[in-house]
Image: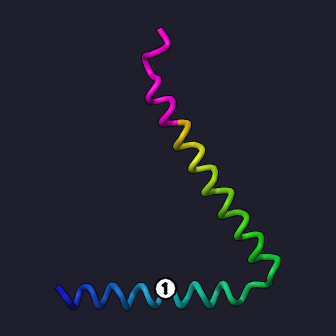
Amino acid sequence: MIEFVQNAVDFGKKKLDKAIKFWNGLDDDKKRLYTVCAIVVVSFVIVASIAYSFGKSRRGKFI
């Protein structure tokens, strides 16, 4: 079990290092663009989930 956890941690470290190298290789304009895109996507998911929950909770109460 410990070996499984160690392998998972090593795999995560390798992927994180690769992502950090990619992020550091970008120029400031692309970093800003990716950050804004991520914020927009997260905001859209939050708004969609709130709208879905409102619609689900009000279902059948219109009559």
The residue positioned 56% from the left and 36% from the top of the image is: 51
Three-letter amino acid code at the position of disc 1: Lys
- The residue furthest top is 63
Q: How many callouts does the rendering have?
A: 1
For the residue carrying disc 1, how many other residues have a C-alpha within 10 Å: few (<14), some (14-19), or many (20+)?
A: few
21 is higher (above) or lower (below) than 30: below
Q: Residue 6, image x and y in percent?
A: 29, 91
Q: Seen in the image, is 56 located left or right of residue 47?
A: left
- The residue furthest left is 1
**Which residues are the magenta region?**
52-63
Q: Residue 39, image x and y in percent?
A: 67, 61
24 is higher (above) or lower (below) than 46: below
Quadrant containing the N terminus in the rendered view: bottom left
- The residue furthest right is 29
Q: Hey, which quadrant is residue 18 in on the image?
A: bottom right
- For label 1, the residue is 15
Q: Residue 13, image x and y in percent?
A: 44, 89
Q: Hey, which quadrant is residue 60 in on the image?
A: top left
